[in-house]
Image (cartoon, rainbow, N blue to C red):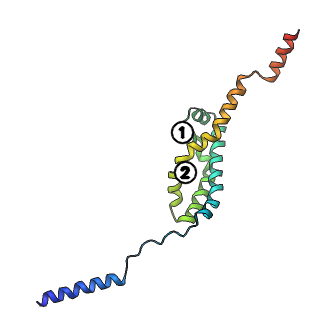
Amino acid sequence: MKTSILATFAVLALVSGAEARPHRLPAASKVNTAEAEKVLAPLRQAATECFADTVLSNPKATAEARAGRWYEAVGITGFLCRPEVAAMIQAHDRLYGAKTGERYFKGAYVKHLDQQLAERLQPMFARKAVASAEPPVEKASAEDSAEGN
């Protein structure tokens, strides 16, 4: 009987102690999404523009991009965009917490990077293909004058 009474007191002591110290859940993020987007949007745009420019400046990367292999194209020249990527990651970390920027870059950002690059670069590839199909201006004018004789 003494044992059951002592056991009851022990359980009550544990339960009341647990109630006195509730589990600590991580604090809810108090980040204003609109304000965060104002900070991140220009950094995301700068990184994407850097990737687009470096892909266009490297013939091997451009060939990969023309073939629709965007990830491979960025892989060839992406190291040149480290400052832009680092700025985006650091800003994300400041806004949402440590290590969130790296996860964002490797996840959500990279997931849509190929689409962003396609939207920016496909029109340039199409214009160059059309422009390269026409004879150079000097040659065309020389041919026209030869036909006129």
User: SS for tag 1?
Assistant: helix
Q: What residue type is labelled 2?
A: Tyr
Coordinates of residue 93 in the picture (x, y in percent): 55, 63
Residue at x 87%, y 14% (from the top left corner): 145
Residue at x 61%, y 60% (from the top left corner): 37
Q: Please identify the quarter of the rendering in which residue 96 is found.
A: bottom right
User: Does residue 133 appear to the left or right of 137 in the view shown?
Assistant: left
The C terminus lies in quadrant:
top right
From what the image shows, is residue 129 above or below residue 61?
above
User: Does residue 101 appear to the left or right of 141 in the view shown?
Assistant: left
From what the image shows, is residue 39 above or below residue 79?
below
Q: Mark 1 points at which residue?
A: 72
Q: Which residue lies furthest to the front in this view?
A: 34
* Category of crowding for the residue at label 1, using alpha-carbon neighbours closer than 10 angstroms: few (below 14), some (14–19), many (at least 20): some
Q: Which residue lies furthest to the top in this view?
A: 149
Q: Name the residue under label 2.
A: 109
Q: Please identify the quarter of the rendering in which residue 23 is found.
A: bottom left
Residue at x 51%, y 60% (from the top left corner): 100
User: Does residue 99 appear to the left or right of 84 in the view shown?
Assistant: left
Q: Residue furthest left?
A: 1
Coordinates of residue 146 in the picture (x, y in percent): 85, 11
Coordinates of residue 104 in the picture (x, y in percent): 52, 55
